[in-house]
Image (cartoon, rainbow, N blue to C red):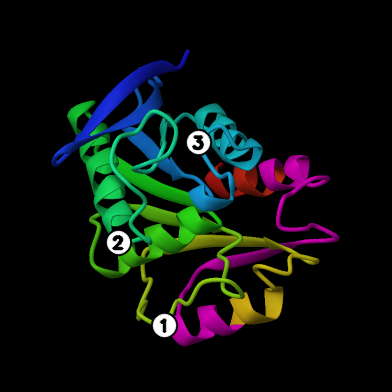
Amino acid sequence: METRITIPCESIRLDGWLNLNPGSKKGVVVTHPHPLYGGNMDNSVVLQIVQSFYRAGFTTLRFNFRGTGESSGMFDNGDGEQDDVRAALACLGEEGISEPYLAGYSFGSWVNARVVDAGAGIKDHIMVSPPCAFLAFDDVEKLPDTGLIVTGGNDDIAPPDKVRALIERWESPAEFAVLKNGDHFYSQTLAMLDKVLAGYLA
């Protein structure tokens, strides 16, 4: 069962939900879509990612970026949000998680990519619909710890061809899954996303 927690991050406090998986050393931080467009940790895709990881034996932690929901602070264009991700990973470490994963959807995957590129010390990194037609990934040079990238075949914010070009530029070994007929909001493809995640994490 998820427990509401507060994550300290310098002078601000982040609102989150932690679900401990007893006996597991694996854990994941899951980040949400763009807060200026209504994104938060209660987003349906975020919840699906959390459920998929928990069923695979992971402790899960989802949280609201600064300035979102009950989290204090102000939106920082993806810069301060990187510190939010690091604070959440540190929180997992305090819970005894020695194999941290990082997973993000849309804006969350953009923030995560910058954290990973800077050296996050994680075991694996999963990106769901990296919004490369909306936000620039120019400052992300390498993502060697990325194992899986997913997008929809009809995703106009994370178009498969643009995502594929990024994977090639990063020289990433990541698996790339394109969900047939899927759009950016996974309105009809949450079950397909769950199947991809479950297969990858098995």
Residue 41 is labelled as: 3
- Residue 44 position within the rendered picture, expressed as x and y whole percent measured from the top left: 65, 36
Could you tell me if the residues under marks 3 and 1 are in contact, i.e. CB atoms within 8 Å? no
Of badges 2 and 1, the one in the foreground is 2
Query: Which residue occupies 73% across, 69% down?
Result: 156
Residue that carries the numbered disc 1 in the rendered image: 138
User: From where the camera sits, is residue 78 visible?
Assistant: yes
- Residue 184's disc is none
Q: Residues within 10 Å of mark 1 (few under 14, many from 20)?
A: few
The one nearer the camera, 158 or 1, is 158
Position of residue 128 relative to residue 194, above or below, is below
Q: Position of residue 172 (x, y in %)?
A: 46, 76
Work out which quarter of the rendered image holds the C terminus and state it: top right
What secondary structure is marked by label 2?
Answer: loop
Question: Mark 3 is on which residue type?
Answer: Met
Is residue 186 covered in magenta?
Answer: yes
Query: Residue sitting at 46 percent across and 49 percent down?
Result: 103
Q: Which residue is mark 2?
A: 79
20 relative position to 41: left or right: left
Under tag 3, what secondary structure? loop
Residue kind at label 1, given as amino acid type: Asp
- Please give left or right for residue 143 compared with residue 48 in the image: left
Mark 1: secondary structure? loop
Q: Is residue 18 above or below residue 174?
A: above
Rate crowding at label 2 as few (under 14), some (14 to 19) or many (20 or more) other CA atoms within 10 Å. Answer: few
The amino acid on which the numbered mark 2 sits, given as a three-letter code, is Asp
Q: CA distance from mark 2 to mark 1?
A: 14 Å
**Mark closer to the chain start, 2 or 1:** 2
Segment colored magenta: 165-194
Characterize the local packing of mark 3: few (<14), some (14-19) or many (20 or more) Cα atoms within 10 angstroms.
many
